[in-house]
Amino acid sequence: MSAPDLRRGACPTLLDPMATGDGLLARLVPASGRFRPSELAGLAEAAGRRGNGVVEVTARGSFQIRGLDPSSAEALAADVASLGIVPRTGVPVETGPLAGLDPTETADGSALARSIAESVSRAGLAARLGPKVSVVIDGGGAVPLESTLADIRLDAAGGGLWRLALAGTRATATPLEEMSAREAEARTFALLGIIAGLGRRARGRDLLTGAEQPPRRAEQGDVPPLPVGPIALRPGESACRLVLPFGEVAASTLAAVANEATALGIREIRLSPGHGLLLIGDAALAERSRALGRRLGFVADPGDPRLRVSACAGAPACASAHLDTKHLAGELAAAMEPGAETIHLSGCSKRCAEPKAAVRVVGTSAGHFSTGGAEMPAAEAVPAILDALRTHAPSRRGHAA
Ligand code: SF4
């Protein structure tokens, strides 16, 4: 295992964890894109033994373990290997988690993703590209990757065509042209080669400089929320999407859901963008999976107020944080009125990956936060933020902090 990477812009993996406020953070995505429920139970139990007892699924749909040290991180990597879980390595070439299973998707991008990943691997491009360079192949459907940032995007355009775009989400990336899967594979590989030629700090956006730069797309607009609960798949099959409250649960809770999923007869569990899990099996299991999620404290219903509050890692997980964002998020969700608009909590002014939200709250110094331009002591946080939510004018949506 190499020394922990402290550089901003590094991407933590199982073998190269990153230092954070509460120790090392390791991140993993299974190369196969799925876990057998027993594998996920074993992973959660190992994470509970080795880390801080809490596990996370990120907005992008990666599994995260915090609170490691060099020796426990090494032990966790050994646990993962002994469970037979093979982590994805190299340049991430991501498809939607239901690619190939979802009858509503425009196209199944999984074969295209495999071909691109194999070409990149054969050419050894990963070693020449920065760790955050990614490719997203979004076939659409119930759980699309439209909000997932990518250096290179291929969005299904219908009729067997893929729309190539650079640097952004589906709404914000700069579109180039539509092409067949074969052309898309060749163009993506060529563009990755150009990015690699610009050095390890280069990103997809660096291909957009100069006179040939196409007009920039609009900013990210309102994106429909991802479904929560049962999702119909191919005849006789279903998925149930459960969301980890504010992106995290106790490792023991994740182990319990995976063990009970095994007993229910769930075939596989996939990680989902938006901090979720997809429990996949016979159609008859979808509502039983939802009931299991509700019982164990997951978000299992689209009206759950916890979906209205998002939070960055915050204190103590992040060394820069002035605010315990996850704790405050729980207090706010418990006190919110039904149908309230959205809140995002950032532990400090860096406001990492801050999404669009009606009210945005930022930790400013120990024991203080700001919202709507006013700074207050953290002891007043819940009533002050709920008040800001009540007085939020729709015309100011997304600009309240
Ligand atoms: S916004 Fe600040 S506190 Fe939150 S994760 Fe980023 S650096 Fe840490």
Image (cartoon, rainbow, N blue to C red):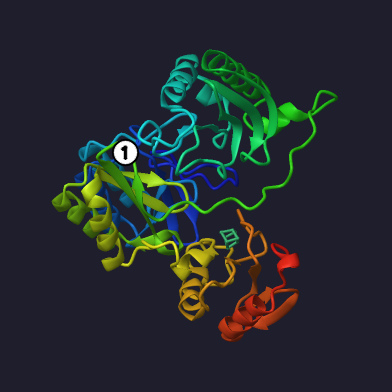
Ligand 1 falls in quadrant: bottom right
The image quadrant where one finds the N terminus is top left
Of the pair 121 and 23, the residue shown nearer to us: 121
Judging by the rendered image, the residue that carries numbered circle 1 is: 34
Task: Name the spot of residue 54 as percent of width and height, x first.
Answer: 35, 61
Task: Name the spot of residue 156 as percent of width and height, x first.
Answer: 54, 29
**Residue 263 against residue 308 in the figure, above or below:** above
Q: Decide if residue 204 is on the left or right side of residue 32.
A: right
Q: Secondary structure at mark 1?
A: loop
Residue drawn at 50 percent across, 36 percent down: 140
In the rendered image, the residue lying farthest to the front is: 235
Task: Name the spot of residue 293 as percent of width and height, x first.
Answer: 29, 61
Q: Decide if residue 103 is on the left or right side of residue 45.
A: right
Task: Name the spot of residue 253 as percent of width and height, x first.
Answer: 27, 62
| Residue 252 showing in the rendered view | no
| Residue 120 showing in the rendered view | yes
